[in-house]
Image (cartoon, grey):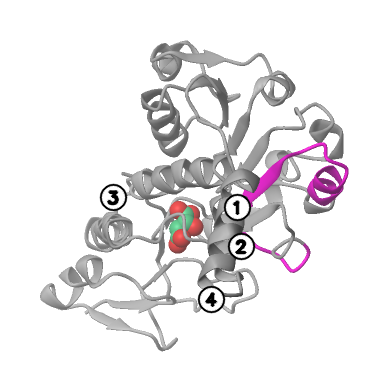
Amino acid sequence: MYKILTLNNISVVGLERFPRDGYEVASDMSAPDAIILRSYKMHDMDIPGSVKAIGRAGAGTNNIPVQRMSEAGVPVFNAPGANANAVKELVVTGMLIAARNVCQAYDYVRALEGSDEEVEKQVEAGKKKYAGYELPGRTLGVIGLGAIGVKVANAAQALGMRVLGYDPSITVTNAWKLNAGVEQASSVDDLLARSDFITLHVPLIDATRDLINAERLRLVKKTTVLMNFARGGVVDEAAVEEALNAGKLASFVTDFPTNRLRCHDKVIALPHLGASTGEAEDNCAVMVADQVRDYLETGNVRNS
Ligand code: MLT
């Protein structure tokens, strides 16, 4: 009987196959055959030698010591694309709430004080103060055209936006990603200079750490909204703070709040909600559970 250790809450829809097949699902560390997790940081963990496979119920694997595991012959499975729809919907939400000043207007209305007449007057003033703009005709720059980036690009097109894409891995064979009306930017810098909204959909690896830094932020328009639903480390937050304070960047929407920026007036910070829908959690759990189970049963390595 195999034992599966879960390090985070994993959807039962994904885990239910294990007891059915005679596996044990546990949260104690004693001799698990496989680990399934979401965002638990495994780098400093003493990983039991009994572990034969790791399943990450999500796209990113930066919380797992993948190199160490592969040297030990332990495959790490993830769930590419399984939560792409959830992330796409939150990116679209991010653009809309930034363009329409929704967060600031919401705070404003809740803080109003006075009689009915006084509140009415302040509501009227808020209508003017928080007037926004519309998305059609604006340009969205998508950095990273994997499963999530492509979905985001298509959603933006459906909203009437122009889409610029940049992904160093676009080749002749996967150029279809750009055929659907996504214009290929010649470089990250080119994309930054021409976009009204910028969204990042790259993994956190050495090449993408601080991808958006002070030098690059100098290229963006002062009306641009920067969105990070990828990973905290791909944006240099000190540089973002400087750009926001200097009026060189309109706002920053981030799914990775830090103490530095979470309360900044021009920042909309969410608690890593991109993939947090019931549907996405089910899809990710099913995808990794299938892969882990297949591997334990047959030794087959597949990444769906
Ligand atoms: C991902 O990498 O897809 C997300 O971080 C998943 C999650 O929120 O657990």
Q: CA distance from mark 2 to mark 4?
A: 49 Å
Is residue 67 at all visible to an observer of this figure?
A: no
* Residue carrying label 3: 300
Determine contact: label 3, label 4, CB under 8 Å.
no
* Residue carrying label 4: 47
Marking on residue 108: 2
Label 2 or label 1, whichever lies nearer to me, is 1
> Based on the displayed image, in which of its 4 quarters is residue 111 positioned?
bottom right
Q: Amino acid at mark 3?
A: Asn
Look at the image and tell me in which quarter the N terminus lies. bottom left
| Label 2 SS | helix
Horizontal relation, residue 34 to residue 186: left or right: left
Label 2 or label 4, whichever lies nearer to me, is 2
Q: Examine the structure image and report whether residue 246 is included in the region drawn in magenta.
A: yes
Q: CA distance from mark 2 to mark 1?
A: 8 Å
The region drawn magenta spans 239-260
Q: Amino acid at mark 1?
A: Gly
Q: Residues within 10 Å of mark 1 (few under 14, many from 20)?
A: some
